[in-house]
Amino acid sequence: MVTGQTLVPACGPAVPTPRQVLATLSQVFGTDKVGETGYEIAAAQCSDEEKDHARERGLSLLYGELLPDGVSKALQPGWLGSSLSSGNGLLLELGMGSGKVAMQAFLQCRGVAHILGVELVPSRFAIAEAAAKRLPESLPKAFKMCQHTPGQCVCLEEAGSGRKAELWCADFFNVGLNYCDRSDAIFFAVSIPCKLFPDLCRRLAQAKEGCRLFSYHSLEAIWWIDEPCPFHQCEANVSELDTFATSWSPQGYKFYVYVCDRTRPPHITAATRNETFSEWQAVWDDASQAYYYHNQENERSQWEVPHQAGCWQAAWSEEHRAYFFWHQPTNHSQWEVPKCLADLGWG
């Protein structure tokens, strides 16, 4: 039942997914849930408790996922596939949502011996958990469930080969990133708050040589640590036109694909005091003829000009009767307005 990866020349944001794979995904997730588009797809619906928890942590529950043909393109040799041809590879997915990408890779990519997917939001994990339970029920001769702790983890095994798909409901900073040093490929198609960038980069700096990374964030924008970045953008992905089909943008959305190669000098410059990144967007409101400010990390909006952007904060000096600008992680202060705050109107 498991099919090998067809080497199709990649063109545009999608590569056709094998029909057998689509049929099995439809069996375990539901025909109407595979290939969903728009902003109101099943996994986007969260409980009030989950929303409150996200607000407390400064997280956004805005959700989208790669479409099957976008995943098929990502699994091609020019992107992640070159690291997944050994037959004993480990594929790590950080923030797996409904589990469709992890399940598709398990069914489609024979070079992966172990898939590990991690999702923080319980309702999204529940969709993945239910699909994982249906797979051996639908195809008992091909798959079996070898571990299941309801609401926490589920592990499937393919008969004969012993290949495994392991899905966890956890914070991937606790379970997931600790596998960076042994992962052959990493799906990281989620947005995280900028306060987590340094810790994320410290973990990614330990990546296995040859590991390929599929990232929502450009590493050039988030590498906020002194440690050299071992990743280089894959040649096939350098063009801004290299995109992947997603639920919110079926015509293609830009993701960044890298390979860990320490034999080359670092190409991505470390920027511990990055002055350009901002989570805020100034939006014009016709009704009031004024700008309001939308936080793209926690999805909150406000009229007041933000006092903090990225890791920079505008702080008042009573002595000088003026604002100075403080970079929290490095404890650096300066009078000059960093670009992330200047763009919002400071200075």
Image: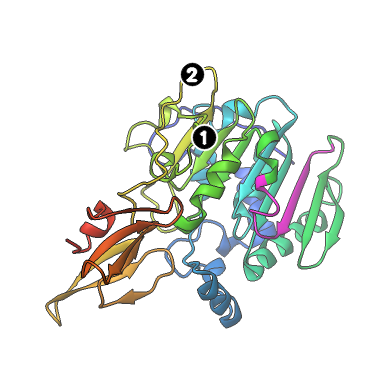
The mark nearer the N terminus, 1 or 2, is: 1
Q: Is 38 located above or below residue 25 in the figure?
A: below
Residue at 76% x, 55% y is 135
Q: Residues within 10 Å of mark 1 (few under 14, many from 20)?
A: some
Q: Is 73 located above or below residue 44 in the figure?
A: above
In the displayed structure image, the side of residue 59 where residue 172 appears, left or right: right
Q: Is mark 2 on a helix, strand or loop?
A: loop
Confirm whether the magenta stretch covers residue 173.
yes
Q: Is 221 located above or below residue 318 in the figure?
A: above
Type of the residue with mark 2: Arg
Residue, disc 1: 227
Which of the numbered marks, if any, corresponds to residue 264? 2
Residue at 72% x, 57% y is 168
Q: Residue furthest left?
A: 289
Type of the residue with mark 1: Glu
Is residue 117 visible in this depiction of the protein? yes
**Quarter occupied by residue 43:** bottom right
Q: Which of marks 1 and 2 is in front?
A: 1
Q: What element carries label 1?
A: loop
Q: Give the magenta part as a residue range.
A: 162-177
